[in-house]
Structure formats: C-alpha cells, structure tokens
C-alpha cells in the first residue's frame, strides 16, 4: 500500500516521504495513529511541499549547528568540582553539568542528549566530550576539570 508519511517513522521513512508498506502495517498501525495517509495524486503534491520545507529546515538546523561547532571547538570549558587529594572527584561530571558550564561560560544552549561522554569523568584534568548537534555536524568539546577550593 502506498502511503504519505505525516511524521518520521523509524525504519520506514521521514515526514513527507511516499512509501510502500504492507497493507496490514498500514491499516493497523500507521493510519490509525495518524502517522500516514493514503497516497493519492493531490497528497503526492502535498508531499513535495512537505519535503521542500523539511529540506529548508534541515539546512537551517545544520547551519546553526556548524556555527555552534565553530564557537565551541577552539575553546576549553572549565568545570570546578570537589576532589580528593589524589585528584579523584567525589562523583563524576555529567552531560548536564557540561551543558550548564557551556551556557554559563559561552551563552550557548545545548541539549544534554546531544552530548556523549565515553567514560565517566571522575578525575581532574582535560577530557573530551562528543557533541552531535546534527546528523552531519559532530565535534568534540574540550572540558577542563579542576578541583574546587
């Protein structure tokens, strides 16, 4: 069955795509939940409009992500945490703390879900935090953790 997707569906397609799916999947899942509608000639013209607006929005999102990357890649984000005598932190630095530090120091709002810390930051020193603001824009934020007095 040919359908026009009204929103992004994992494994099927993105909003505005005309896809061919099994009849049962369309009848029992996609259409009742409002995720898709039957593809007719008029609907396919509407789909083209949806794809154009998605492309414009995606280009704007990518440009904004590249601007943030240009700002954050060359700088070092400083975070002060309580630490023991050997440089071990009492706890660990989380993505939420990195987001707060970036907002306070550089005025850039990030979502903590866009950041990824490979291993928990539990020591004083310089660490890398991966940021993925867009599917095509990934970069590393340098975080300097120091002991709070």
Image (cartoon, rainbow, N blue to C red):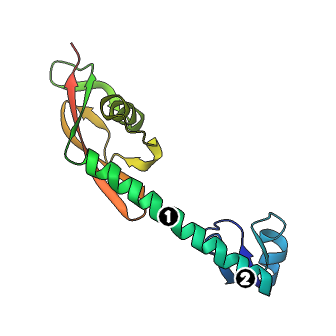
Which quadrant, please, contains the N terminus? bottom right
Out of 140 and 28, give the one closest to the viewer: 140
Label 2: which secondary element: helix
Q: Residue furthest top?
A: 149
Instruction: Using residue 92 as the reference point, say whether residue 62 is left or right of it.
Output: right
Q: Where does residue 82 sit, x and y in percent of width and height?
A: 27, 19
State the separation of the CA atoms marked 1 and 2.
21 Å
Q: What number is the disc on residue 58?
A: 1
> At x 72% / y 82%, what residue is drawn?
44
Q: Within the image, what quadrant is residue 27 found in?
A: bottom right
> At x 75% / y 66%, what residue is drawn?
35
Out of 138 and 71, give the one closest to the viewer: 71
Mark positioned earlier in the residue sequence (1 or 2): 2
Q: Is residue 85 above or below residue 1?
A: above
> At x 39% / y 31%, what residue is drawn?
100
> At x 38% / y 35%, what residue is drawn?
94
Q: Is residue 66 above or below residue 129?
A: below
Which quadrant, please, contains the C terminus? top left
Q: Where does residue 65 sit, x and y in percent of width and height?
A: 39, 54
Label 1: which secondary element: helix
How busy is the neighbourhood of tag 1: few (under 14 within 10 Å), some, or many (20 plus)? some
Instruction: Using residue 56 as the reference point, say whether residue 92 is left or right of it.
Output: left
Q: What number is the disc on residue 44?
A: 2
Q: Within the image, what quadrant is residue 127 found in?
A: top left
Instruction: Using residue 104 as the reference point, say whether residue 19 is left or right of it.
Output: right
Residue 39 visible here: no
């Amino acid at each position: 069955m040919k359908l026009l997707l009204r929103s992004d569906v994992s494994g099927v397609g993105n909003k505005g795509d005309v896809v061919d799916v099994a009849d049962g999947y369309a009848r029992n899942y996609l259409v009742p939940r409002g995720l898709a509608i039957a593809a007719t000639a008029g609907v396919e013209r509407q789909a083209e409009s949806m794809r154009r607006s998605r492309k414009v929005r995606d280009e704007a999102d990518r440009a904004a992500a590249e601007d943030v990357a240009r700002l954050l890649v060359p700088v070092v984000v400083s975070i002060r945490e309580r630490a023991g005598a050997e440089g071990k932190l009492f706890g660990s630095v989380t993505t939420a703390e990195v987001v707060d530090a970036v907002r306070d120091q550089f005025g850039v709002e990030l979502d903590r879900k866009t950041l990824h810390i490979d291993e928990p930051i539990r020591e004083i020193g310089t660490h890398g935090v991966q940021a993925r603001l867009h599917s095509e824009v990934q970069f590393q934020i340098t975080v300097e953790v120091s002991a709070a007095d």
